[in-house]
Amino acid sequence: MARGFYSPKGGEGGRQGRARRTNWLGLLPGLGFSLVFIASCSSTPPRSEPPPVLPISPGLPGTADLTQSPGFAPFIERMRRHGFAPAQTRAILAGARYQPAVIELMDRQAPRASGPSGAWTRYRAKFVNEAVIGAGLGFWDRYALALARAESRYGVPPEYILAIIGIETHYGRVLGKTRIIDALATLAFAYPRRADYFSQELEQYLLMVREEGLDPYTPRGSFAGAMGLGQFMPSSFRRYAVDFDGDGHRNLWDPVDAIGSVAHYFAQNGWQRNGLVAIPAQVQSREKADTLPSGLDTRYTLAKLAQAGIRPSIQLGSSEGISLLKLDAQGGYEYWLGLANFRVITRYNRSIYYAMAVHQLAQALQTGRMTQRTHSGASPQ
Ligand SMILES: [Ca+2]
């Protein structure tokens, strides 16, 4: 998802229609404020235990009020600075439901084994496969004009925009069906480990629905609050979403707006037109290569890499700032060199596997497109 963390796909399905518009005056106070929430917000359950199952209908005896969360009062204050009266914020949140499944899914994102276990090969197979490539090529045909326009305006090639949308939502097939307000309120007020992050996203969400004139209870998406074909978090929605079809609304459930918005996201995060993303590396020996630390934050010159017996598989100019990437593939580690645009992809989701899957899916889509166009006699673009 845009700006967040890896979210496992496939647990949610459904299609989000265009979010209904609302009259904000209708949300002013008058609703009851009794909210049902997790009883204790002071600790995170250990990963090995199932998450607590709590009643979700308001007013049941023995349940706590959302206002008991230590983050609740500061949140009301923060929204006041944006012109939300406390009663108004409370009224909106009164309609949010605690969703234990959200906590459960969040806790399931266990850290990966340190390897070698072939984790990259398994990850790749989920996203770079015939089904996703086929759907991506169909999407490319349908939205070729918008993709070309996005490339011209933002410098991001169609295949990378398509790879993001394919990995995030399988081209709109898996958009998530959790109400965004439920996901964000649950994580902001009942998930202490990430409360800071999610209360900021909840704040951004309320600002977003006010700006866009949306009913706060209508948008749906992932259990972590990501929305639309590119799975933007609310802060990314506000910062990077664009109205790319010119109908006056930013609608990330609309493919054309999603295409423009993903490209805009990349451009704003430093995407270099015609820049390289990643290339395989040849290593003389693993022992020698492993004398250099690897990872997203590493920066090497070609000379430094050569000293460790690591060479690019294609000729590179005098590149600086090369990240050495080591992937836990089945049958042994793979070494890659990540360039500036690779790191831009990680701004979307800070994961080497994620960015590499985007890159490899993009390459497969480009090859597929060229093959199609060649066979049909069209120019291979
Ligand atoms: Ca639009």
Image (cartoon, grey):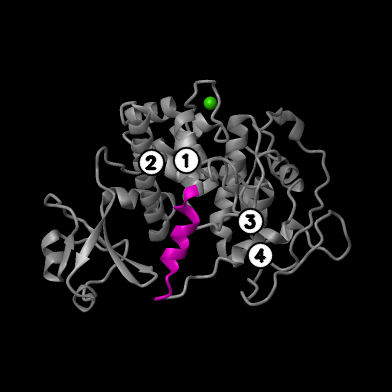
Camera-nearest label, 4 or 3: 3
Question: Which of the labelled discs sits on residue 11, or is there none?
Answer: 3
Question: Pointer 4: what residue?
Answer: 104
Of label 1 and label 3, which has the lower sequence position? 3
C-alpha span from label 4 to label 1: 31 Å
Residue 256, above or below 3? above
Q: Nearer the viewer, residue 181 or 66?
A: 181
Magenta stretch, residue numbers: 115-130
Of label 4 and label 3, which has the lower sequence position? 3
Q: Position of residue 180 (x, y in %)?
A: 65, 46
Camera-nearest label, 2 or 1: 2
Query: SS at mark 3?
Result: loop
Residue ID at (63%, 71%): 44
Are circles 4 and 2 on residues that touch, CB within 8 Å?
Answer: no
Camera-nearest label, 4 or 2: 2
Residue 82, above or below 322? above
Label 4 crowding class (10 Å Cα cut-off): few <14, some 14-19, many 20+?
A: some
- Classify the position of the C terminus by image quarter: top left
Residue ID at (73%, 46%): 90
Of label 4 and label 1, which has the lower sequence position? 4
Query: SS at mark 1?
Result: helix
Q: Nearer the viewer, residue 76 or 263?
A: 263
Of label 2 and label 3, which has the lower sequence position? 3
Query: SS at mark 4?
Result: helix
Asked if residue 122 lies in the magenta stretch, the reply is yes
C-alpha span from label 1 to label 3: 21 Å
Question: Pointer 1: what residue?
Answer: 136
